[in-house]
Amino acid sequence: MTHSHRILTAFAVTLAVAVPAVAGPPLLCHPFDIGSAQSLPWDGTRGWSHGRSDYSLKNLVQDTERLVQPDTPVVVRMETMRRAAIYASQDPDVAAALLDALGSPARVSRDPLASLDTAYAIEALNQMTMLGPASEFGGRVAGVKRVLAGRNAAPLIEAAARARPSDPAVSFAAAMILIGKDKDAYRSHAARARASEDALVRKNLHHLS
């Protein structure tokens, strides 16, 4: 077992205190099946963390905002945020700009799920810092921690749930974000997600098992 794999295993053990059968940082290392929907350019052939080597970070904020619109399905938003967080972790300035853009008042006013996107991105970046300085992301940890200072995903998740209280896709996203953080809230959201008839949610329910 490599050192990186040992770190992921330790992370999984920590998460297992709250929910069973989760391996690795759940918001990062488990790509979501979005079918033919468009998301950020990605490679993925060498593992969950490998985007396109030729992708320019200067386009990340604009590309992410373009892809995530009010009518974008929740699971597509989640996969886009997963990729965006991994890309953004390379540059603290880009990560800060991404989080600011996702949660900007203008965006929040036109998209009731803007807070969900921001919460996902915050917690995905937070999970990356938990991988530790010895992982392949070691050089990114300090910068990401600076970006995350003062940012809290919890009220953003609550805002999204209030905006779409009967949407099981939102419950699916909330459950994923809350894995390892709030056992009772996780179980409540997960139960609603498992009752979903949304095709993309159902294709991805194994992430909750």
Image (cartoon, rainbow, N blue to C red):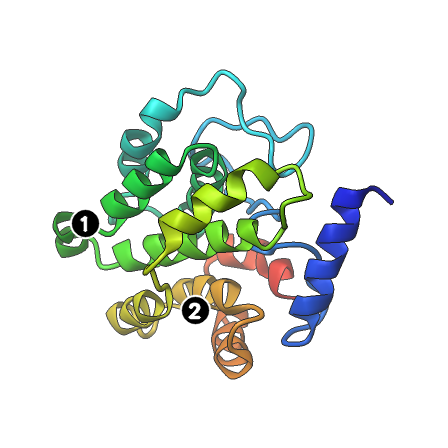
Identified at 44% across, 42% down, the residue is 143
Identified at 50% across, 69% down, the residue is 178
Quadrant of the frame with the N terminus: top right
User: Badge 1: few (under 14), some or many (20 or more) residues near its Cα, within 10 Å?
Assistant: some
What amino acid does circle 2 point to?
Ser
Q: For residue 197, say whether it is visible.
A: no
Quadrant of the frame with the C terminus: bottom right
Residue most toward the right? 1
The image shows residue 173 at horizontal and vertical percentages of 45, 61
Residue linked to disc 2? 171
Q: Nearer the viewer, mark 1 or mark 2?
A: 1
Relative depth, front residue between 88 and 78: 88
**Badge 1 element:** loop
Q: In this view, does 203 lie to the left or right of 84?
A: right
The image shows residue 195 at horizontal and vertical percentages of 51, 73
How far apart are labels 1 and 2 at the CA level?
23 Å
Location of residue 57 with respect to 118 vertically, above or below: above
Residue linked to disc 1? 104
Residue 66 placement: quadrant: top left
User: Badge 2: few (under 14), some or many (20 or more) residues near its Cα, within 10 Å?
Assistant: many
**Badge 2 element:** helix
Q: Is residue 70 left or right of residue 127?
A: left
What amino acid does circle 1 point to?
Ser
Relative depth, front residue between 161 and 98: 98
Identified at 62% across, 31% down, the residue is 44
Q: Is residue 141 left or right of residue 158?
A: right
